[in-house]
Image: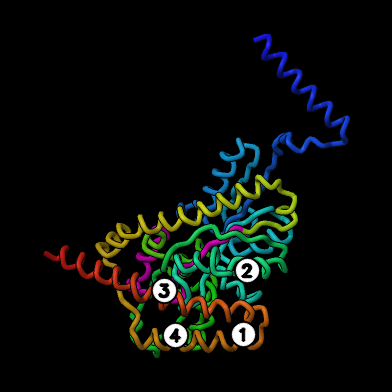
Amino acid sequence: MQRRKFLTSAGTGLIGGSVVGLGGSAAAQSPPAAEIKWRMTSSFPKSLDTIFGGAELIARRVAAATGGKFQIQVFAANEIVPGTGVLDAVKDGTVQMGHTASYYYVGKDPTFAFDTAMPFGLNGRQQNAWMYEGGGLPLMREFFKDYNIYQIPAGNTGAQMGGWYRKEIKTVADLKGLKFRIGGFGGQVLQKLGVVPQQIPGGDVYPALEKGTIDAAEWVGPYDDEKLGFNKVAKFYYYPGWWEGGPQLSAYINLTEWAKLPKEYQSILEAACAEANIDMQAKYDAKNPAALKRLVAGGTQLRPFSNEILAACYKASLELYAETAAKNPKFAKIYAPWKKFRDEQVEWFSLCESRFDTFAAATVRAERKK
Ligand code: CA
């Protein structure tokens, strides 16, 4: 005991001495971990444990991995800023961090859509492939620098449903004049076909649909949509949400705050966001099947979008991309490599994955009917 105490004191003395004597060559000695408190504002209401839960997971993991030294307090939409105010709040330093869907900001620049989802774009796996390994992340981070933001992928919902409609939508003509709450770039595509797109944050969609201010609304998929109660005010539930094959959620960090953060904390935060990215998709995939069964049992009518509607929407999407690329150099710079990557992904997935999924779907369906 005595001997250990002596060694400890001697060691401390030695390190202390070297700092004084050699002018700060104490790099091997870890500095005491910094205590940091941040605020993170989410675009989503607390009631959505899936999508709001992503921000909570990040905060929880960061606190646990730093022994409680790095604390991030999470705020729901409207506690500090509205759901669509996250970009400006992080950019201006109102908060250090946010959790949001970048396509909420396509009104500022359509280039934001690449960070979440493009109509007829990537599915969730392909979005990860593009971001982490396909050159997407460096391109997006360069774009986000203009907004004083460091962005990290931090969640995915998987392919979304096409939304809730009070009336059946059978042909392209049925889209004319339809007041439709839709997130992101998909609204601009549908505008070409006569839809009147509405940008309304998640928590405000139900009252608008109930009052008839809007005719239809899309949010995510069975689990969230059931929670928000859309089935009570619209009967027809369409699929797929072709404008969101695998929408990504993103963590936004004020660039100045990011630069001030100790390297260890930066690394922990990146890892926590990667965990949130996997966890959110897992939650949706695990919870959606039971929710869909409940909805159908309660009278919801499932409808696939007709081939006529899908083909017209695809054509309108490509037109919109070409027009946007022609007048927006930032968009054009990302669109060209993104399109190449997407086309290659679709070709690859159409072979092995598609055959596997299609066979499994047909077999399981047949077995369940027996
Ligand atoms: Ca959606």
Residue at the spot x=50%, y=58% of the render? Answer: 155
Task: Identify which amino acid the numbered label 2 is placed on.
Answer: Met
Residue for badge 2: 140
Across and down, in percent, residue 171 comes to 36, 88
Mark 1 vs 3, N-terminal side: 3
Viewer-proximal residue, 108 or 23? 23
Amino acid type for the residue under numbered disc 1: Ala
Marks 1 and 3: which is nearer the front? 1
- Residue 174: image quadrant is bottom left
Name above or below for residue 44 compared with residue 319.
above
Q: Is residue 357 shown left or right of residue 52?
A: left
Give the distance between the C-alpha atoms of the residues marked 4 and 2, in whole angstroms: 26 Å
**Disc 3 and disc 2: Cα gap in Å?**
24 Å
Question: Quick check: 122 above or below 169?
Answer: above
In the image, the residue with mark 3 has its CB under 8 Å from the nearest atom of ligand 1: yes
Image height check: is 285 above or below 20? below
Quadrant (top left/top right/bottom left/bottom right) for the C terminus? bottom left
CA gap, disc 1 and disc 4: 18 Å
Q: Residues within 10 Å of mark 3 (few under 14, many from 20)?
A: many
Residue annotated with mark 1: 325
Q: Which residue is mark 4?
A: 313
In this view, the mark in front (1 or 4): 1
Label 3 amino acid? Gly
Q: Nearer the viewer, mark 4 or mark 2?
A: 2
Horizontal and vertical percent position of residue 151: 63, 61
| Part of the protein shown in magenta | 227-251
